[in-house]
Structure formats: structure tokens, C-alpha cells
Image (tube, rainbow, N blue to C red):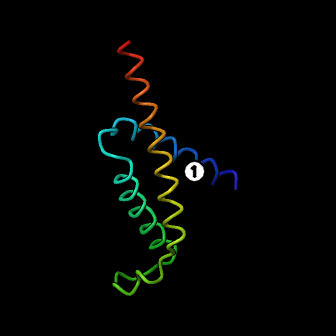
Amino acid sequence: MDLFIFLLFIIGLFLYMTMRYVYIIPAVFSSLLLGLLVTISLEWIALDLPLQLTSFKKLSIPFMVTVICLLRFLLETANFHQKEHTAQKQS
């Protein structure tokens, strides 16, 4: 359990650091696309689903929404800190 929490922290920190520099793209679009990509790939691996259109019915929508909301929070925070950092450099 501790390893899982540590891995989540490292992944979140990596996303935060990389997304600080992509503040030109609105966080709504990037979190939606990244969240869908991450959740679909995670569930495909975890559930061992075949590559068929019927497999989409087995995906968990609440899990997708939770990941997308968490990514939106993370990306908005990264964008805010990047804008504050650039504003402090200019003044």
C-alpha cells in the first residue's frame, strides 16, 4: 500500500512538472484527453479486455470521471503556479 501511494505521488509530481510548461493549452481539454487516455489504458490492462467495440461497455465511467477531475485539478494548479512564477520574474 505504501508503494502504491508513493508511485501515485511520483506520477502526480511528474505530471505537475511537465504540465507546468504546457499552460498555453486550456486545462479542460488536456485533462479530458489525458484522463480518457489514462483511464482507458489502465482499465484495458487491468480487465484484460479484447480490442473490440463491445469492450467499451465494460469500462467504469465513475473511475473515468474521478481521474479526469483529479487531472483537471492538477493541471489547473500547475497552470496557476506557472503564471505566478512568470509574473514574479517580470516584476
Q: Residue furthest top?
A: 91
In the image shown, does 47 or 72 lie closer to the viewer? 72
- Image coordinates of residue 11 in percent, x first then y, are 51, 47
Name the residue carrying label 1. Answer: 8
In the image shown, does 26 or 74 lie closer to the viewer? 26
- Image coordinates of residue 59 in percent, x first then y, are 47, 77
Relative to 89, say whether 6 is above or below.
Answer: below
At horizontal 40% and vertical 64% (from top left) the residue drawn is 36
In the image shown, does 43 or 82 lie closer to the viewer? 82
The quadrant of the picture occupied by the C terminus is top left
At horizontal 43% and vertical 26% (from top left) the residue drawn is 84
Relative to 53, say whether 71 is above or below.
Answer: above
Dot 1 falls on a residue whose secondary structure is helix
At horizontal 34% and vertical 84% (from top left) the residue drawn is 53
Q: Residue furthest left?
A: 24
At horizontal 46% and vertical 71% (from top left) the residue drawn is 45
- Image coordinates of residue 74 in percent, x first then y, are 49, 45
